[in-house]
Amino acid sequence: MNAHRTIAGFLGAMLLTATASFAQQVKTDYDRDSDFGHYRTYSWEKVQTPDPLWVDRIKEAVNSALAAKAWKQVDSGGDVAVVAIETTQNQQTLNTFYDGFGGGWRWRGFGGFGDSTTTVDTYRVGTLVVDLFDSSTKKLIWRGSASETLSDKSDKNIKTLDKGVQKMFDRFPPSPKK
């Protein structure tokens, strides 16, 4: 019974750790000297992604977020130029499981250590970086990034993209300096 509780506790801790490590990470930063009150329009400069199907999806997500902030998209000559870059890379995690008979950190007096099994899990992580440049000075004024574990299901990845972009622009535009 005690071994079952130990294994259940260990598996629960592993699930919490795995969930935390796979949570979406969103970061933003901006030029503290820029006055975002002067920017009202934007134009797309470039969307770079290994999958051409994602170009329109990325533009749609960013367009929706900026429209919610009362920014207007123009074909060219906007106050701000938008550049988005999406990358995908493989990550690995090691999982070690013990059989509960004295292995790991404890000695149970069974005359030796138990067996352990280590597996390697490979998963894909997608990262989207959105940069906003002042069109007149060509200076970077804002950067947002979102990273998330990718699914094998396209619909789930699209929802993840939309959620990440919305999180990126939650506190956009930055508050003016005081």
Image (cartoon, rainbow, N blue to C red):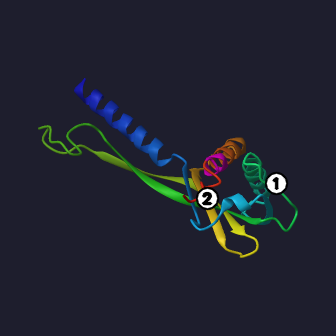
Residue at the top extreme of this rendering: 1
- Rendered view: 40 above or below 67: below
Three-letter amino acid code of the residue under disc 1: Lys
Residue at x 45%, y 44% (from the top left corner): 20
Q: Is residue 154 above or below residue 58?
A: above
Q: Pick whichever, 12 or 45, lies toward us.
A: 45
Q: Quadrant of residue 33?
A: bottom right
- Give the residue at x 39% y 41%: 14
User: What segment is highlighted magenta in the picture?
Assistant: 165-170
Question: Dot 2 surroundings within 10 Å: few (below 14), some, or many (20 or more)?
Answer: many
Residue at (34%, 31%) from the top-left corner? 8
Q: Nearer the viewer, residue 97 or 136?
A: 136
Q: Check if residue 168 falls in the magenta segment.
A: yes
Q: Quadrant of the N terminus?
A: top left
Q: Which mark is drawn over residue 53?
A: none
Decide if residue 95 is on the left or right side of residue 132: left
In this image, 35 relative to 46: left or right?
left
Q: Is residue 24 above or below residue 39?
A: above
Which residue position is annotated with label 2?
Answer: 144
- Which residue in the structure is indicated by mark 1? 72
Q: Amino acid at mark 2?
A: Gly
Q: Is residue 99 visible?
A: yes
Could you tell me which residue is drawn at 27 percent across and 45 percent down?
A: 115
Name which quarter of the figure residue 72 lies in: bottom right
Give the image location of residue 123, x and y in percent: 55, 52
Is 130 positioned to the left or the right of 111 in the image?
right
**Front in this rendered view, residue 129 or 79:** 79
Q: Quadrant of the C terminus?
A: bottom right
Q: Give the structural element (helix, strand or loop) at label 2.
A: strand
